[in-house]
Image (cartoon, grey):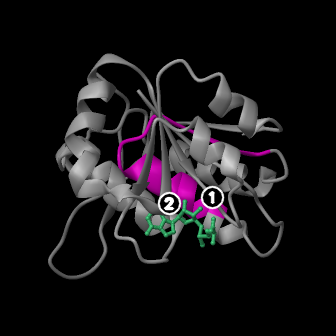
């Protein structure tokens, strides 16, 4: 399983970013996101999308992100521009993930050094500064080797029919 933990949330300013961390985690194959406990509005939006477009996907709030990381029973990957190159470590991480739950840590503002120390891998998606949403998306796609793109969704109320042009959304009927 894959859990994403978001460190830090400045209400107002980070609302969209935190929401997008959750939506990206969900869309690209993670099972759960843990947001800071002041990010209730983002939690609501992500739950609403999961209700409409399917799951399973869990959205939790926590006041103790650091403890979650410290006590994680499994592998901890911290995404940071200062880390090892994703293309150099992805195979090892994939192997570890086959055996035990993976926790992916993304920051908002400056991430304190204890997180770097608690991580099994500090991983850079390039060593250039960009965004937690972009870093997470590329990392998950590498982890799952593209298979997340074919994922089936459960308990959706609606689904998008892919189209060359235009928008088509259809309601999903009751399961037989
Ligand atoms: N300047 C902050 C620091 O030094 O810790 C990081 C701020 S950055 C806007 C927010 C988050 O985006 C980071 O904590 C990291 O998780 C992610 N991020 C940014 N660039 C990244 C990269 N090249 N590779 C992986 N993650 C990245």
- Read off the residue under disc 1: 107
Query: Under 8 Å from ligand 1: the CB of mark 2?
Result: yes
Q: Is 18 placed left or right of 157 in the picture?
A: right
Q: Report, in whole angstroms, how far the alpha carbon at label 2 lies from the one at label 1.
A: 8 Å
Report helix, strand or loop for mark 2: strand
Instruction: Tell me the number on the disc at residue 141.
Output: none
Give the image quadrant in which the ligand numbered 1 is located.
bottom right
Closer to us: 155 or 26: 26
- Horizontal and vertical percent for residue 164? 14, 77
User: In the picture, which quadrant includes the N terminus?
Assistant: top left
Report helix, strand or loop for mark 1: loop
Q: Residues within 10 Å of mark 1 (few under 14, many from 20)?
A: many
Q: Which residues are magenta?
A: 18-36
Query: Residue at image x 73%, y 38%?
Result: 65
- Horizontal and vertical percent for residue 175? 33, 26
Q: Is 150 placed left or right of 139 in the picture?
A: left
Marked residue nearer the N-terminal end (2 or 1): 2
Instruction: Tell me the number on the disc at residue 80.
Output: 2
Q: In the rendered picture of this protein, how many numbered marks are placed on residues?
A: 2
Q: Is residue 125 above or below residue 73?
A: below
User: In the picture, which quadrant includes the C terminus?
Assistant: top left
Asked whether residue 45 appears in the rendered view, the answer is yes
Closer to us: 65 or 87: 87
Query: Residue at image x 30%, y 36%?
Result: 93
- Horizontal and vertical percent for residue 56? 46, 32
Q: Is residue 22 magenta?
A: yes
Q: Is 51 placed left or right of 89 in the picture?
A: right
Query: Residue at image x 20%, y 65%?
Result: 162
- Horizontal and vertical percent for residue 133? 49, 65
Q: Is residue 113 magenta?
A: no
Query: Under 8 Å from ligand 1: the CB of mark 1?
Result: yes
Task: Please identify the quarter of the rendering in which residue 92 is found.
Answer: top left
């Amino acid at each position: 399983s894959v859990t994403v933990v978001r460190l830090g949330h400045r209400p107002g300013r980070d609302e969209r970013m935190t929401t997008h961390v959750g939506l990206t985690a969900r869309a690209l194959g993670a099972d759960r996101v843990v947001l800071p406990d002041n990010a209730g509005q983002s939690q609501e939006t992500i739950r609403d999308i999961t209700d409409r477009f399917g799951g399973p996907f869990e959205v939790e709030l926590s006041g103790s992100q650091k403890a979650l990381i410290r006590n994680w029973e499994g592998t901890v990957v911290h995404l940071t521009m200062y880390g090892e190159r994703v293309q150099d470590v992805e195979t090892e991480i994939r192997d570890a993930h086959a055996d035990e739950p993976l926790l992916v840590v993304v920051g908002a503002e400056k991430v304190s050094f204890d997180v770097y120390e608690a991580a099994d891998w500090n991983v850079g998606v390039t060593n250039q500064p960009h965004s937690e949403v972009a870093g997470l998306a590329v990392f998950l796609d590498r982890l799952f080797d593209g298979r997340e793109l074919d994922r089936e969704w459960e308990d959706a109320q609606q689904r998008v029919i892919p189209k060359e042009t235009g928008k088509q959304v259809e309601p999903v009927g009751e399961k037989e």
